[in-house]
Image (cartoon, grey):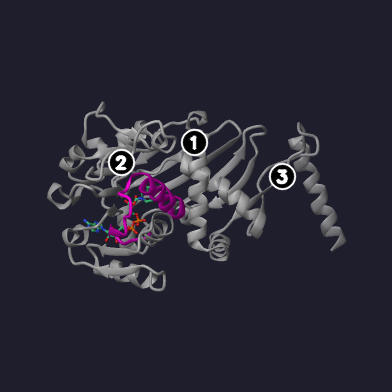
Amino acid sequence: MKTLNTVPFVSVENMMRLVLELGIETCIEQIAGYIEEDFAKWQQFDKIPRVASHSREGVIELMPTSDGVDYSFKYVNGHPKNTRDGLQTVTAFGLLASVETGYPVLMTEMTLLTALRTAATSAVATRALAPKGSTTLALIGNGAQSEFQALALKKLCGISKVRLYDLDPAASQKCARNLEGSGLAITIYSSAEAAVEGAHVITTCTADKQYATILSDNMVGSGQHINAIGGDCPGKTELHKDVLLRSDIFVEFPDQTRIEGEIQQLDDDYPVKELWQVLSGEVPGRESDDALTLFDGVGFAVEDFSALRWLRDALQLTGRFVDLDMIADPDEPRDLYGMVIREVERMANERAAA
Ligand code: NAD
């Protein structure tokens, strides 16, 4: 089989246009479907905690996985101090490849795609774990991820009211402005305590490279569901340990979450349930109306794999990519050197013809 030597590449501009053409909420809903499909065949995936290179200011990570047919990886950073310099906390790009040939089949920006898939994952978890009839979301941390999180929970979980809180009021105002016309009723609060009181679902997506206490035990009540997605590397958490001790805790891949998630504060053998097991019906999700459920989301490679699969299919409809000449592909596979020599001849012919 001869494989094409160009690789479709989705730039930030093309990703924005694709998302606008399909609609942000539709994209999130579709990605959620791909995530559920892949979580249903969880056992087939190669799974390792992501490979992290830590520095004082942040982390750079590689996130590989494969289901035996496709292979993917994402390069992603997390640098909370970046926004002070006008840079993003999280940026990413990634690649999907064929296991059969080892050739890349898609390369793409993944900063936007990560926001979409993180929102889709929160929605998948919320749909499985939040109390039935939840309508009110408290969103603590109103940065880059926040609007995507709100829209995902509106589209997939029936959220209609969003209460915003951020240390920086300008971030909440930005989020409220961006969500105008979304159909969500938005209120900005001046403290996290006020924002979470009475909310059915709480999503924390703050960025700070420390053991922070965004939610303390007295702030959360029974019957609530928490998505804690901002604590996602060693030494970076959002919840007080006492909240964890009261919660039914659900995670993506325990080996990674015990290193990076809220549960890094607990013993290594502290019992947690895996989201894929809930989705497949193997273990119960919410066990009672007054249970406190916690999705300790750190972001796992399988979700990126799902997002990349979604994008590959979405490109068939939108054609929003350019071809990258990134695979050296000589006519005679073993004659890589000859391919270079023939390029000299080709360039000389071009000059002569000019
Ligand atoms: P961001 O820097 O754009 O926004 C973070 C916001 O949190 C800022 O507006 C900041 O003012 C606010 N904040 C910081 N400390 C706070 C506090 N104590 N109380 C209230 N607000 C506070 O970052 P982002 O891209 O929105 O990402 C948010 C977090 O989510 C980051 O830590 C990032 O690493 C993490 N993240 C996780 C996943 C995942 O899959 N779980 C995916 C993407 C990002």
Q: Give the quarter the ligand 1 occupies.
A: bottom left
Question: Most extreme residue toward the right, as rendered?
Answer: 353
Amino acid type shown at disc 1: Ala
Q: Mark 1: is the Cβ under 8 angstroms from ligand 1?
A: no
Q: Mark 2: is the Cβ under 8 angstroms from ligand 1?
A: no
Q: Is residue 123 magenta?
A: yes
Looking at marks 1 and 3 on the same chain, the residue that comes earlier in the sequence is marked by 3
Location of residue 269 in the rendering, given as x and y in whole percent from the top left corner: 26, 26
Q: Which residues are magenta?
A: 115-144
Q: Is residue 41 above or below residue 31?
A: above
- Give the residue displayed 28% in from the left and 48% down from the top: 225
- Give the residue displayed 31% in from the left and 69% down from the top: 186
Pick the front one: 351 or 317: 317
Amino acid type shown at disc 2: Arg
Q: Is residue 229 above or below residue 265?
A: below
For this view, does 219 lie left or right of residue 66? left
Q: Which residue is mark 1?
A: 40
Q: Which residue is mark 3?
A: 5
Q: Can residue 74 be seen in the rendering of this structure?
A: no
- Give the residue displayed 27% in from the left and 43% down from the top: 293
Instruction: Kindly report the distance in space between the C-alpha atoms of the residues bearing marks 2 and 3.
Output: 49 Å
Q: Which residue is mark 2?
A: 286
Instruction: Kindly report the distance in space between the C-alpha atoms of the residues bearing marks 1 and 3.
Output: 33 Å
Pick the front one: 132 or 92: 132
Instruction: Kindly report the distance in space between the C-alpha atoms of the residues bearing marks 1 and 2.
Output: 19 Å
Dividing the picture into quadrants, the one containing residue 342 is top right
Pair 2/3: label in front:
2
Q: Is residue 289 above or below residue 147?
A: above
* Quarter of the image that includes the C terminus: bottom right
